[in-house]
Image (tube, grey):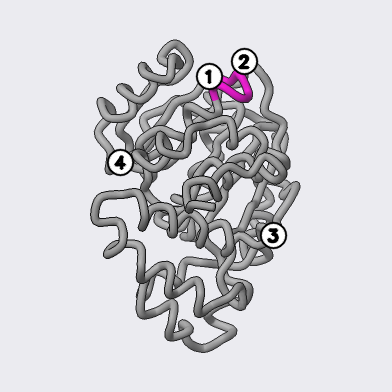
Amino acid sequence: MTALEDLVRPDRYPLSSRYDPSWLLKLDMGPNPLWLLEDLARDLDLRPGLRVLDLGSGRGATSVFLAREYGVQVVAADWWVKPEVPAAVFAEAGVSDRVDAVQAEAHVLPFEEEGFDAIVSIDAFEYFGTADSYLPYLVRFLRPGGQLGIATPAMTREVRELGVIPPHIKEVVGWEAIAWHTAEWWRFQWEITELVTVTSARLQQDGWRDWLLWARACAEYQPDGQASNQPVIDMLNADGGEFLAFALVTARKNQV
């Protein structure tokens, strides 16, 4: 079986398996975003007609998935990717009528307060959402009862508890691992504000294996993929699930 065939997994990700892996590889910006989103969405109530902010949407794969699979209206917001890039992806996927691309920095969001029924963030929240003040800022854009869901790289134990970033992780990502928290860290961080009620906080089962499958496919099928992905492959093999995971966390904004 080739690395590309490994990415079609209807037993675990039936919705994601409908998508051409080669299409997704062209939009790659990290671990497989559709697997993360599909797993996260099991803890959310996404229904047709809801207005959803896809925060840190990258080149647009997750926004396409949200529009197609759940029938929601999506605002795809990213700071590093110019809107015309995902807009072309949306047009090709036939979802331009349901998805708008916006360039926005996560701390200066250009939206009206209480304008969204849900906010999701896939493999991005670790870059902007760990500050104590961020959740209180972000939930301003959710209607009362609105949903929040993130899928973010995680550790099975806090770096603070370990006292050091494990060497095989530090060698590849350096200090970034400080922001890779446990699911329970996120639960406390959110619930202590009393602004939301956490509905689920878990580590993705064998998430490191999913990441490894994706990194191997990227190494095999992307131009210069071996050079950029081999360090990640080596890190994941060395870790073997001891420390590396993904945290999937969902919550609802409390009623006023």
Looking at the rendering, the stretch of residues picked out in magenta corresponds to: 67-73
Describe the element under mark 3 as helix, strand or loop: loop
Describe the element under mark 4 as helix, strand or loop: loop
Q: Looking at the rendered structure, which numbered label has been put on residue 205?
A: 3
Q: Where is residue 144 in the image (x, y as percent from the top left)?
A: 66, 31
Q: Where is residue 200 in the image (x, y as percent from the top left)?
A: 73, 50
Describe the element under mark 1 as helix, strand or loop: strand
Labels 3 and 1: the sequence-earlier one? 1
How many numbered markers are drawn?
Answer: 4
Query: Is disc 1 in contact with disc 4, using a CB cutoff of under 8 Å?
Result: no
Labels 3 and 4: the sequence-earlier one? 4
* Residue 162 is inside the magenta segment: no
Labels 1 and 2: the sequence-earlier one? 2
The residue at the far top in this view is 97
Query: Is disc 3 in contact with disc 1, using a CB cutoff of under 8 Å?
Result: no
Q: In which quarter of the image is residue 185?
A: bottom right
Labels 2 and 3: the sequence-earlier one? 2
Residue closest to the eye, 46 or 191: 46
Q: Looking at the rendered structure, which numbered label has been put on residue 123?
A: none
* Tag 4: amino acid: Trp
The residue shown at (58%, 20%) is 72
Labels 1 and 4: the sequence-earlier one? 1
Looking at the image, can residue 253 be seen? Answer: no
* Tag 2: amino acid: Gly
Q: Looking at the rendered structure, which numbered label has been put on residue 49?
A: 2
Question: For this view, does 88 lie left or right of residue 165?
Answer: left
The residue shown at (53%, 19%) is 73
Q: Distance between the residues labelled 3 and 4?
A: 30 Å
Circle 2 crowding by C-alpha within 10 Å: few under 14, some 14–19, many from 20? some
> Foreground mark, 3 or 4?
3
